Image (spheres, grey):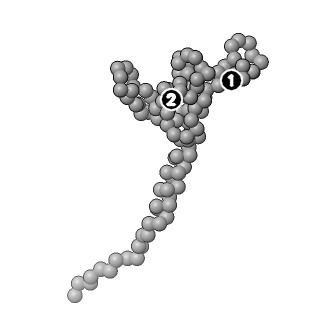
Amino acid sequence: MDTFKQTGKRGRPQIILNYPKQGKFTANDLVELNPHVKCRLSVYTHAYKLVNKGVLRYTGKTIKTGTVGKPLDEMESMANFRRVRSLKRTNKLRKLANATVDLTPASVAVPA
């Protein structure tokens, strides 16, 4: 019972879903990371709950499995999404700060 968290509520204890804190992953990766969960559907359901809570997010991309069936949705943690977005923003601002702009007026030829 060490893999379940006691909350004092009635019913079956809720599973603790392990997910990568950095990088992108699919539901198949979550199944491999959570061998204590016996049912694949429980992993999908709990991942969906984490998406609704704002812990995970769908990236909008799909990954083909190489077999017949629906491609898998790509997910990432919101912490990773915010970290990557912040890195992109700082890199963009660094490039803009290094760009030099010449504001001196250009010389115009005076007609004689």
* Residue under numbered circle 1: 3
In the image, 108 versus 88, the foreground residue is 88
Task: Note whether 34 is above or below 99 in the view shown.
Answer: above
Q: Amino acid at mark 2?
A: Asp
Task: Find residue 93 and report its horizontal and vertical position in percent.
Answer: 50, 58
Q: Amino acid at mark 1?
A: Thr
Task: Find residue 27 and report its horizontal and vertical position in percent.
Answer: 50, 26
Task: Note whether 35 is above or below 11 in the view shown.
Answer: below
- Give the Cα distance between marks 1 and 2: 19 Å
Is label 1 in a helix, a strand or a loop?
loop
Name the image quarter holding residue 36: top right
* Residue under numbered circle 2: 29
Does residue 63 appear to the left or right of 14 in the view shown? left
What is the quadrant of the C terminus in the image?
bottom left
Residue at coordinates 53% horizontally, 27% vertically from top-left?
A: 32
Look at the image and tell me whether residue 52 can be seen. Answer: no
In the image, 11 versus 65, the foreground residue is 65
